[in-house]
Image (cartoon, helix red, strand yellow):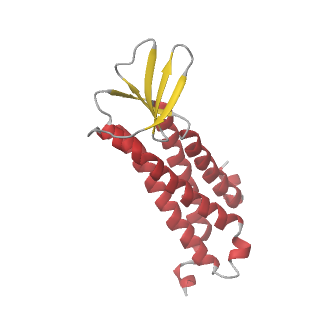
Amino acid sequence: MLSDIYRNQGLFKALFLTVGFVLIVFCFFCNVGEFNKSTSKSKYYYTFSARYHSSSSDGIDCYQDIDTCNGDGFCNTVKTTPYLGGFALGFIGLVLIFSFGESIISRVIKKYHIWIIQLVFLFLAWALLLIIPILYLTTKGNNWNLCWFPIIFEFIAVFATSFSAFLYYKSNETRGPGLLS
């Protein structure tokens, strides 16, 4: 298995990065917190996309923007998450664009510089992906139960992005820093 990954590094680094990208997109459709005092007739949630979701036993779902948080730290985290996730998606998207268009971009920028740019974007995406679940785990208040599905997706996306970054690093590590000039 490892020999296959080493032989097909380009395929696997893009594959793991795409898996991380897709998992983050799936997170935007998930609920991240359920209100403790929900009744059997109605349940209240915060979504990953910073919306307030109320669901009734009649099958009626209502999504609303979150207006004010009134000092609730978990609400502030929920309102921040789409920006962090969006920037992480943007950085991963840029790395994928640089990967797929490397032959065209290398006419303007040296391949080693492209590799360094990709590593920087991967590090930024990885840091943002790691911050999101840590924020949720540390700011969960007394009124909200954490929904684990998007948190698990985030950690899997962190793992996939980490493995992809490792493969990106290994792909040019042997050339040495002399290529910067």
Quadrant in which the C terminus is drawn: bottom right
**Residue 148 horizontal/vertical position (percent):** 46, 31
Q: Residue at x 56, y 58 (%)?
A: 90
Q: Residue at x 51, y 32 (%)?
A: 63
Q: Residue at x 65, y 67 (%)?
A: 98
Compared to residue 37, the image places residue 14 above or below, namely: below
Compared to residue 93, the image places residue 42 above or below, namely: above
Name the residue at the bottom extreme.
Answer: 181
* The one of 3 and 97 positioned closer to us in this rendering: 97
* The one of 167 and 120 positioned closer to us in this rendering: 120
* The one of 113 and 63 positioned closer to us in this rendering: 63
Name the residue at the left extreme.
Answer: 71
**Residue 122 horizontal/vertical position (percent):** 52, 61
Compared to residue 127, the image places residue 77 above or below, namely: above
**Residue 54 horizontal/vertical position (percent):** 47, 25
**Residue 139 horizontal/vertical position (percent):** 31, 39
